[in-house]
Image (cartoon, rainbow, N blue to C red):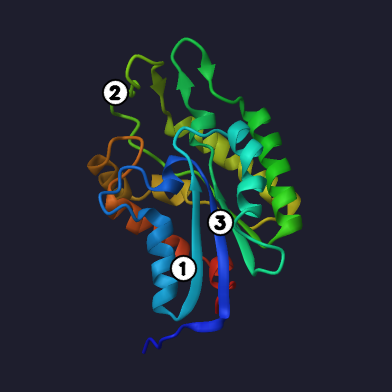
Amino acid sequence: MKTFPPNRNSFSRICFIGDAFTVGAGDETALGWTGRLVAGEWAKNHDISLYNLGIRGNSTRMIAERWRRECEARIPPAANGRLVFMFGGNDAKEEVGSGVEVPLEESAAIARAILREASQWLPTLWIGLIPMNDTLPYPQLLSGPQYRFSNARQAEYNARYAEVAAEIGVPFLDLHTPLMEDPRWMALTQAGDGSNPAGEGYAYVADMIARWPQWRAWFD
């Protein structure tokens, strides 16, 4: 049975850093996976302050420039702070006529620097890329560039990130591999805009993360 007030011993501040999928783009409830994930922990009597630091369109280059500053503004030295990263989709996207946004090895090097610094500062988790519906026509932002997304290319970035995580000792959750083989997930991508799912898709991902032993270790 849930009690109130929540267990103050479990009070924590968690920054979720990433791109559109972190911010919950396309979710009609505006909760995304982060809101659902934290709501689930509140139901278990864990007091969590959620700071969603996702920005649509952000690549690792952009995240590298902002993450520490933004997190330090939200997690003072005495706080029980935690960090969760999810990024890479924008690195792997292809701008038509120009190539991928951030080449694989550059992306891996930036990710390594980010996650190494983060994990030396606070407890840190890293979540891999999410497959999208890459069968839809690629989106165009107003009169701006056109992009192509490829799950096959994302799988390469995801695998490289997993290698980096193992090298630096940061827990990494590979969602891309199981979701690519999951008919339900691929059906859920049809309900979104191609790049991002609708609310049910975010709920599906939140449930997977909630059952991840490394996430559970923070609370149980």
Where is residue 98 shown, x and y percent of the image?
Answer: 51, 12
Is residue 207 at least partly visible in the picture? no
Q: Which sits earlier in the primary sequence, circle 1 or circle 2?
A: 2
Q: Are marks 3 and 2 in contact (CB under 8 Å)?
A: no
Residue 98's tag is none
Crowd around label 3: few <14 · some 14–19 · many ≥20 (10 Å): many
The amino acid marked with disc number 3 is: Cys
Residue 15's tag is 3
Crowd around label 1: few <14 · some 14–19 · many ≥20 (10 Å): few
Determine the secondary structure under disc 3.
strand
Provide the residue designation for mark 1.
211
Taking depth in this image into account, of 82 and 152 the one nearest to the observer is 82
Determine the secondary structure under disc 2.
loop
Q: Are marks 1 and 2 in contact (CB under 8 Å)?
A: no
Determine the secondary structure under disc 1.
loop
Where is residue 146 shown, x and y percent of the image?
Answer: 38, 17
Quarter occupied by residue 186? top left
Residue 137's tag is 2
Left or right: 106 as drawn, with respect to 17: right
Left or right: 103 as drawn, with respect to 180: right
Q: Are marks 1 and 3 in contact (CB under 8 Å)?
A: no
Picture layout, residue 87 above or below residue 91: below
Left or right: 158 as drawn, with respect to 4: right
What residue do we see at 36% from left, 89% from top?
A: 1
Where is residue 193 shown, x and y percent of the image?
Answer: 28, 36
The amino acid marked with disc number 2 is: Pro
Q: CA distance from mark 1 to mark 3?
A: 19 Å
Where is residue 7 shown, x and y percent of the image?
Answer: 51, 84
Q: Which sits earlier in the primary sequence, circle 1 or circle 3?
A: 3
What residue do we see at 71% from left, 35% from top?
A: 109
